[in-house]
Image (spheres, rainbow, N blue to C red):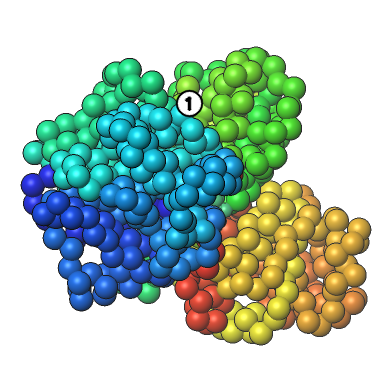
Amino acid sequence: MCGIVGIVGTEPVAERLVDALRRLEYRGYDSAGVATIHDGKMDRRRAEGKLFNLEKVLDGEPLPGTIGIAHTRWATHGVPNVTNAHPHFVEGVAVVHNGIIENFSELKEELIAEGAVFESQTDTEVVAHLLAKYTRQGLDHKAAMLAMLNRVSGAYALVVMFADDAGTIMAARSGPPLAVGHGKGEMFLGSDAIALSPFTNEITYLVDGDFAVLTAQGARIMDFAGQPVTRTSQISQAATFLVDKGNHRHFMEKEIYEQPEIISHALSHYVDFAENVVKQPDMAIDFGSVSGLAISACGTAYLSGLVGKYWFERYARLPVEIDVASEFRYREIPLSKNQAALFISQSGETADTLASLRYCKDEGLKIGAIVNVRESTIARESDAIFPILAGPEIGVASTKAFTCQLAVLAALSISAGRARGTISADDEKAMIRHLIEMPRIMSQVLNEVQPQIETLSRDLSRFKDVLYLGRGTSFPLAMEGALKLKEISYIHAEGYAAGELKHGPIALIDENMPVIVIAPHDRFFEKTVSNMQEVAARGGKIIFITDERGAAASKLETMATIVLPNVDEIIAPMIFALPIQLLAYHTAVFMGTDVDQPRNLAKSVTVE
Ligand code: F6R
């Protein structure tokens, strides 16, 4: 997390650096800072909190200069305050950093023993001190950088400026992403291509172990031994994305409401609407011959993978091993080369997901990436890319990426079923017809349930704890509902498999804990209703999210019943995701929290 940017050119940079930071604020918003060199003097402005605060500081005290670096922070080491904000300055060296320097404590001790005085609590400052030390010892800037890179370990993207060289920016990547942008007489660096999109669409992505030296004329890329390496540039699609809220109050609201249109676009990539069949997927993975699938991801993306597990097992009879990436990467799971692996990530940069991918790659598995950002590291390291085509998701809480991930997983599981002969051509056509209908039903649901949910969210906001229950594919949805509610409203929420209720959580049930039951009238319905009875018998307040058949079949008294249209099992998770997103959204709005940038979170998690 943390967003970094740099410009070396001929025009003033401060305003453009802040403009680029605005597009990187999704990576962190604890503090922000910018530094430039002008007339041989390096200067900086920093501010705690959102970028807006930095802009105010810059309005009062502008920064001239045609070279500069900037940073928006997601705090790892040290509280979010001005002193810990980047850029960090030590004796004419300026550093911005994304990631974690894992050996910073020992380096700091060593540097302090040598007389260094640290200003901040950050791990980043050791980089600036090391560079200052090597420069003092007489190394030139490039040699100092290489010496420093050979001392630090961990995950980092680093961008560095030296006060006595107003024509050069240096950068290194070991983990978190870094993109070099090629302008006309100017060069750029950014955590992603979207940050650089107003300046250039010609991008070179650095890979792990790359060290780059940028001047206004171009970039030289080397390894950490200083040996030149060749990286080709590409034309990025990032500039085509329009990123504004439209008529909506928040990006999250906009992203919820654009789901019908976006999912229809995503489906058109995977489904032949004329023939009602799935288009032939990327041949790099042959679902027909694999012995099993390994799936890994984090957070909401993991929960979409969990729904995918139900589908791959049911429709394609394909065994699925799935785990959150932070566990998957260290479990030493025995895998066979006959298995394929799928990694799901909106950003395509999540550190744990990337590490799990690399683990599977080392084990010889074919790798598929279900990603939103097609130019991301996870996409680039995969054999097959399955884009979710959701467009930029700015709200930190994932909404449209989740349903688009589900749509892609649905299409892939049908395709796998066809390849393995476990679903008939008629079944496939029927399922595709349901998928084709889905955008229309999503629109209908969004319009119909919104007023009821807005009212309900006022009631929900009075509670401190909420339990979500579901069975089958509604179980991951229950967890997703709980995740959405807790991350943006800060109400404590848990999602449980409805059948697990009596093995523990039932002890919590009383009139102070609403239980949100997600239950379409599917093959699990009766069993879920029995679990609801258990809640009702203990005085629990039930919010029942069901369909018309379910509402007609249940006679239980509820705090509220949200009735959706009857839909087929294959599209139910995407349809039932909508009321749980809206419920979290309206509850958070009612409580007055920062919906798009909830506290402590960041959109792209590039540290472990
Ligand atoms: C929750 C949310 C997170 C992400 C998770 C993975 O609303 O957005 O849980 O799903 O951090 O991120 P990606 O998909 O970028 O790998």
Front-most of residues 133 and 314: 133
Please determine whether, in this image, residue 277 is positioned above or below residue 461: above
Q: Is residue 104 visible?
A: no
Front-most of residues 559 and 248: 248
Q: How many numbered marks have been drawn onto this rendered protein structure?
A: 1
Residue 419, position in %: x, y?
Answer: 58, 20
Q: Is residue 600 visible?
A: yes
For disc 1, the marked residue is 382
Q: In this image, 187 relative to 440: left or right?
A: left
Residue 291: quadrant of the picture: top right
Residue 466, position in %: x, y?
Answer: 72, 72
Q: In this image, 208 relative to 290: left or right?
A: left
> As shown in the figure, which amino acid type bears the numbered disc 1?
Ser
Front-most of residues 125 and 341: 125
- The local secondary structure at tag 1 comes to loop
Front-most of residues 49 and 509: 49
Q: Residue at x 47, y 18 (%)?
A: 283
Residue 503: quadrant of the picture: bottom right
Residue 537, position in %: x, y?
Answer: 90, 76
For mark 1, does the 10 Å Cα neighbourhood hold few (<14), some (14 to 19), or many (20 or more) residues?
many
